[in-house]
Image (spheres, rainbow, N blue to C red):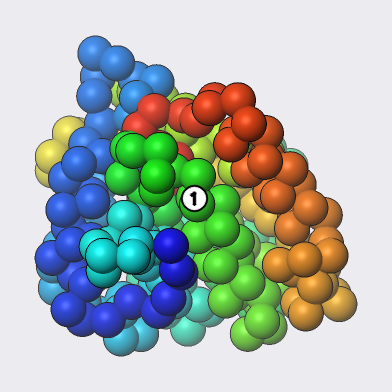
């Protein structure tokens, strides 16, 4: 398996991964991915955001990660609705002048041969933001109508902190309640993120335990 930057030719495979990970209301623990972009939007992300794919030895795409750098985030609907977040202490005011990134999506096909590399794919997206000077990274995880359980182990491994909630509305499903998570990228961590930081060590331990026990979320992990 390799993690590499996405190409426009990968967009159909990314859409197929998204389709494979549709949220299942009957089996919420198996849901790891719910909403996402159209083919045009994914193509735009490939050209303007940080998009990595997980590719196997046969050249098949087994997963992908999308991270929005500060300029893309500030031009997005996510940023426009930032003040709708119900914060649990703090708020956006202190972040207006900071370099802020958004971990938009992490999706991996629901087979063990791909799932064991999900942490590496997640860290690659975090590294892309950290290495380009981002001080804060945010992610949202669906809580209602069905809770996305698959992303929680990776959020915990990365020391992400739940800081609030936001109501969203999507044509496919109507009202969605999402938890908002925050990760502070510590100064000096950029060059060591993949190997020497707490993030790297904890993700590595999480991956090692999962490989040893087979205790992987189903079908995730996935961040919406």
Q: Quadrant of residue 148?
A: top left
Residue 111, position as x, y percentages in the image: 33, 38
Task: Tell me what residue is drawn at x 63 percent, y 85 percent.
Answer: 132
Residue 207, position as x, y percentages in the image: 63, 43
Front residue (pair 208, 107)? 208
User: What residue does disc 1 label?
Assistant: 118
SS class, disc 1: helix
The mark total stands at 1
Mark 1 packing: few (<14 Cα in 10 Å), some, or many (20+)? many
Asked if residue 145 is positioned above or below residue 11 in the image, the reply reads: above
Q: Quadrant of the N terminus?
A: bottom left
> Could you tell me if residue 159 is visible in this image?
no
Task: Tell me what residue is drawn at x 42 percent, y 53 percent.
Answer: 106
> Could you tell me if residue 127 is visible in this image?
yes
Q: Quadrant of residue 169?
A: top left
Residue 55, position as x, y percentages in the image: 35, 65
Q: Quadrant of residue 72?
A: bottom left
Q: Is residue 150 left or right of residue 44?
A: right
Asked if residue 147 is positioned above or below residue 100 in the image, the reply reads: above
Front residue (pair 214, 30)? 214
Q: Is residue 195 left or right of residue 58?
A: right
């Amino acid at each position: 398996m390799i993690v590499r930057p996405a190409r426009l030719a990968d967009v159909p495979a990314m859409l197929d991964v998204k389709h494979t990970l549709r949220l299942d209301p009957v089996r919420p623990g198996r849901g790891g991915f719910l909403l996402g972009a159209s083919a045009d939007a994914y193509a735009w992300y490939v050209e303007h955001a940080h998009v990595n794919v997980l590719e196997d030895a046969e050249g098949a795409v087994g997963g992908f990660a999308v991270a929005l750098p500060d300029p893309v985030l500030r031009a997005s609907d996510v940023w426009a609705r930032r003040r709708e977040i119900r914060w649990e202490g703090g708020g956006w005011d202190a972040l207006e002048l900071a370099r802020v990134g958004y971990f938009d999506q992490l999706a991996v096909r629901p087979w063990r041969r791909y799932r064991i590399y999900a942490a590496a794919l997640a860290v690659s997206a975090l590294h892309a933001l950290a290495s380009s000077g981002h001080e804060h990274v945010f992610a949202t995880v669906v809580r209602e109508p069905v809770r996305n359980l698959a992303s929680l182990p990776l959020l915990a491994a990365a020391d992400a902190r739940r800081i609030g909630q936001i109501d969203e509305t999507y044509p496919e499903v109507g009202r969605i309640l999402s938890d908002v998570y925050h990760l502070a990228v510590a100064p000096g961590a950029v060059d060591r993120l993949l190997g020497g930081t707490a993030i790297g060590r904890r993700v590595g331990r999480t991956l090692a335990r999962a490989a040893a026990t087979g205790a992987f979320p189903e079908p995730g992990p996935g961040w919406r």
